[in-house]
Image (spheres, helix red, strand yellow):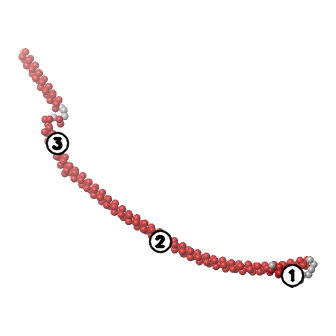
């Protein structure tokens, strides 16, 4: 029986050793599978397949689409720049035409103003000449009337002076000689 116990103890030891070895293997395989050297060949194969598939998809599908989009964008940008240049040239031409029209309009306005001034000056000269003629006629008429009034006033003064002289002589008690009074008044009026 002692043998059986030793055999049993040996079996337990052996089983314990296998269990420890299995546990060590399990601990070792429980780590990251990418670092398991026994699967490197397999991993490298699938890496090459994945890279080849990605390369195929990129070169056949994605990159041609991206290239087409970039070419379309470049074409659109180029056409927009060309259109902008064309519009810029049209705007410059329109600005030149506008400036020329503005210069022409100013020249025409100045011409019209000059013509209007000349016409107004001509009308003003006619009106001034007419007014001067009317003023000259009225001045001559007024001068004539003033001369008539002076002549009438001088006659009236002579008559009043004769009458006054006769009245003074009569008041002093004398008889006045009408001819002598008239000669005295006339000589006095002459200066």
Real-space CA distance between mark 3 and mark 1, rounded to the nearest whole angstrom: 164 Å
Tell me where residue 89 sits by quadrant.
bottom left
Residue 59 or residue 185, whichever sits in front: 185
Real-space CA distance between mark 3 and mark 2, rounded to the nearest whole angstrom: 87 Å
10 Å neighbourhood of mark 1: few (<14), some, or many (≥20)? Answer: some
Q: Is residue 179 left or right of residue 68?
A: right
- Mark 2 vs mark 1, foreground winner is 1
Q: Is residue 140 left or right of residue 28?
A: right
10 Å neighbourhood of mark 3: few (<14), some, or many (≥20)? Answer: few
Element type at marker 2? helix
Q: Residue furthest top?
A: 2
Q: Residue drawn 28% across and 56% down?
A: 74
Q: Residue drawn 83% across and 79% down?
A: 188
Q: Residue drawn 8% across and 17% down?
A: 6
In primary-sequence order, the first of circles 3 and 2 is: 3
- Mark 3 vs mark 1, foreground winner is 1
Q: Which residue is mark 3?
A: 47
Tell me where residue 11 sits by quadrant.
top left
Q: Which residue is mark 1?
A: 181
Image spot of residue 87 (x, y percent): 35, 62
């Amino acid at each position: 029986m002692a043998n059986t116990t030793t055999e049993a103890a040996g079996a337990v030891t052996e089983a314990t050793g296998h269990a420890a070895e299995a546990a060590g293997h399990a601990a070792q395989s429980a780590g990251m599978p990418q670092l398991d050297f026994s699967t490197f060949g397999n991993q490298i194969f699938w890496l090459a397949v994945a890279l080849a598939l990605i390369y195929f998809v990129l070169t056949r599908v994605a990159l041609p689409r991206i290239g087409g989009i970039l070419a379309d964008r470049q074409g659109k940008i180029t056409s927009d720049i060309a259109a902008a240049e064309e519009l810029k040239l049209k705007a410059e031409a329109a600005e030149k035409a506008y400036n020329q029209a503005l210069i022409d309009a100013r020249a025409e306005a100045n011409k019209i103003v000059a013509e209007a001034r000349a016409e107004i000056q001509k009308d003003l000269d006619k009106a001034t000449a007419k007014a001067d003629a009317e003023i000259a006629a009225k001045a001559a008429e007024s001068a004539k009337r003033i001369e008539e009034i002076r002549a009438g006033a001088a006659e009236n003064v002579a008559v009043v002076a004769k009458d006054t002289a006769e009245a003074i002589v009569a008041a002093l008690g004398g008889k006045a000689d009408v001819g002598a009074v008239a000669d005295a008044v006339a000589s006095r009026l002459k200066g």
